[in-house]
Image (cartoon, rainbow, N blue to C red):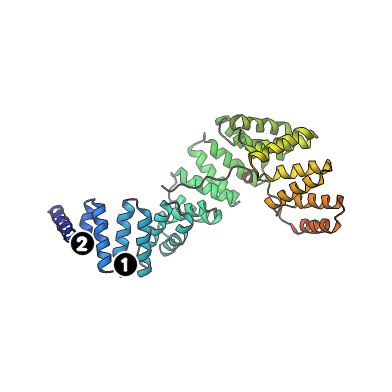
Amino acid sequence: MQNYITQIAAVVLLLALARGQTPNPSAAIALEEQGKLAEAAQAWSAVTRQNPRDAGAFASLGVVLSRQEKYDEAASAYKKAIALNPKLPGVQFNLGLAEFKQGHLEAALTPLTAAVKSDPANLQAQTVLGLSLYGTKHFSAAASHLKIAANSDAANTELHQVLAQSCLLAKQYDCALEEFRKILEHDPDSAASHVLTGEALDGLDKTTDAIAEFQAAVKIAPSEPNVHFGLGYLYWKLHQYDDARREFNNELAVDSGNAQAVAYLGDIEMKQDHTEQALALLTKSTQMQNDLRIAWLDMGAIFARQKKFGDALSAFERAVKLDPSQPDAHYRLAQLYKDTGNAAESQEELAKVRELHQKADDAVASRMSPPKPVTPQ
């Protein structure tokens, strides 16, 4: 009987729409319950035109539009509802989710933050906010929200993976290790988890342990891009250059476009006084990818030794521009100015070196490929 009444209400609504009459909310709800979403959206639009101060009608319109995956229109309806009644339950979350579904992660942050503030127990809001923060590279904040969601869903490996990556990139290494431990318990053959565990261990200055994790990842997935590079970089950190060279070449066999592997091969050749080979590799790496600081720094050093001071100056300036917080390029630039008789400029660069108290970030996580943005589901 109830279903029959609902169908009658829907028919009445459709006739009203055909006559240009304004339907009431109950008729719009009837259409929605029958799955006639286009007609329901039309009905709710009519209700909002009749009463443009009805926040609930705009919110309901947004829900129907979201169900049709018309997220841009839905977001507009939710914004109107919020403008009329900011405390209307659920609308802030719905707006944040609509923005998230469009990939508008920055725009999603404000309504999702409001949703979590009003209802901290809303685990879906905590999750989507955490993912949005991760996608916008606010890793520490992402970790705090994702922990709440992940603790209530131990079996959600993907969620724990994003939490672990957030902790890692926020340099919360103990948190990252704990999450990777949980993931490896569920899937001991996960190459990605071994890599990320290695990155966390390296961040804790346990580079030898990190190497063991990368070796495990290489054994599981020898053709996985970036894994050989990460292992090579760890060997490079420990000055085990023959091992590093082997792994960088292994990386290029998997991914010939890995410019970082080419640059670090060039660095090894420079350190072993193979100047011509080094310069060829370093030049090639900058042609492949123009923002590799180590390549510009090394080329500047080679040019300075060759007394090609103009080329050296350009290379060092490029290295400084890529990361002005690192003292080594400023120091090299100071030495170059000194060698060319520019005492004032040399002192200025040395002063910058003294001001830079931050330790250079040489953790493997800072050299690996950046995290992939989270794709809205």
Secondary element type, mark 2:
helix
Q: Which residue is mark 1?
A: 55
Q: Nearer the viewer, residue 14 or 367?
A: 14
Asked if residue 322 lies left or right of residue 148, the reply is: right
Could you tell me the amino acid type at mark 2?
A: Ser
Q: Is residue 211 visible?
A: no
User: Contact, CB < 8 Å: mark 1 with mark 2?
Assistant: no
Q: Nearer the viewer, residue 190 or 5?
A: 5
| Rendering quarter of residue 104 | bottom left
Q: Which residue is mark 2?
A: 26
Q: From the viewer's perspective, is residue 98 above or below residue 247?
A: below
Query: What residue appears at the point 54 percent right and 35 percent down from the top-left corner?
Result: 191
Residue 57 spot, x, y in % from top left: 28, 64
Residue 106 spot, x, y in % from top left: 49, 57
Rounded to the nearest whole Å, what is the CA distance between mark 1 and mark 2? 16 Å
| Rendering quarter of residue 238 | top right
Q: Nearer the viewer, residue 164 or 370?
A: 370
Q: Is residue 203 visible?
A: yes
Query: What residue appears at the point 71 percent right and 38 percent down from the top-left corner?
Result: 283
Secondary element type, mark 1:
helix
Could you tell me the amino acid type at mark 1?
A: Ala
Residue 328 spot, x, y in % from top left: 76, 50
Query: What residue appears at the point 70 percent right and 54 percent down from the top-left corner?
Result: 324
| Rendering quarter of residue 23 | bottom left
